[in-house]
Image (cartoon, rainbow, N blue to C red):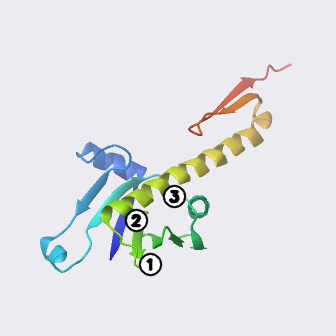
Amino acid sequence: MSVTLILLPIALAAAAAAGGIGGIGAAITAKSNSADTAAGAPPDIRVRTRMKDSTLLADALTNLGATAIDVSRTRVIAKVDGVSLTMTLTDDGVWEAHVESLDGVEVTVESATELLQRLDGEYALMVQQAVAEKIRLRAESSGFDLVSETREADDTVTMVLNVRAEA
């Protein structure tokens, strides 16, 4: 069995949330046609995401232990947790994820959603690291001194910057 998930960029998801779609973590909306369900077709799932960059997406997959990762600007393919994950960027900027069974691993809406929630968490860490690195590199040339940087147990990074007094 396989499951196809459609990942909405966070701006679109916010609009959907205003329309009544919401929840803890990634908001999920399953849509299925009873004729499709009877024919064995998997439901469509919509999941909020902040994923935009295929390179960071590939790095996040690596952190999850994925193998056979193949990346292009509009498609990322990987094997992770006994399933094949294919993510394709549609013309309207929506990542569509298709999770397919490998080696008899059962794919359910719940297992596919859990995988994508873990991927979203790893992706968020990759974005945070990239932003922190840019701040470190640009602080001095922008008139700031990096006074301290701490990382909490939940990987939250706090940076303290002082504005340099101009002579």
Q: Secondary structure at mark 2?
A: loop
Foreground of the two, 21 or 3: 3
* Residue 22 falls left or right of residue 63: left
- For disc 1, the marked residue is 102
Tell me how far mark 2 sits from mark 1, CA to CA. Answer: 30 Å
Number of numbered labels in the structure image: 3
Foreground of the two, 83 or 150: 83
Asked whether residue 76 is in view, the answer is no
What amino acid is labelled 3 in the image?
Answer: Lys
Question: On the image, which quarter does residue 98 sit in?
Answer: bottom left
In the rendered view, would you say 35 is above or below 60? below
Query: Where is residue 162 shown, x and y percent of the image?
Result: 73, 23
Query: Where is residue 118 shown, x and y percent of the image?
Result: 47, 54
Residue 92 is tagged as 2
Asked whether residue 12 is in view, the answer is yes
In the rendered view, would you say 19 is above or below 34? above
Question: On the image, which quarter does residue 36 sit in?
Answer: bottom left
Q: Secondary structure at mark 3?
A: loop
If you read the primary sequence from the N terminus, does the residue marked by circle 1 or circle 3 appear first? Answer: 3
Disc nearest the viewer among 3 and 2: 3
- For disc 3, the marked residue is 52
Tell me how far mark 3 sits from mark 2, CA to CA. Answer: 12 Å
Query: Where is residue 127 shown, x and y percent of the image?
Result: 59, 49
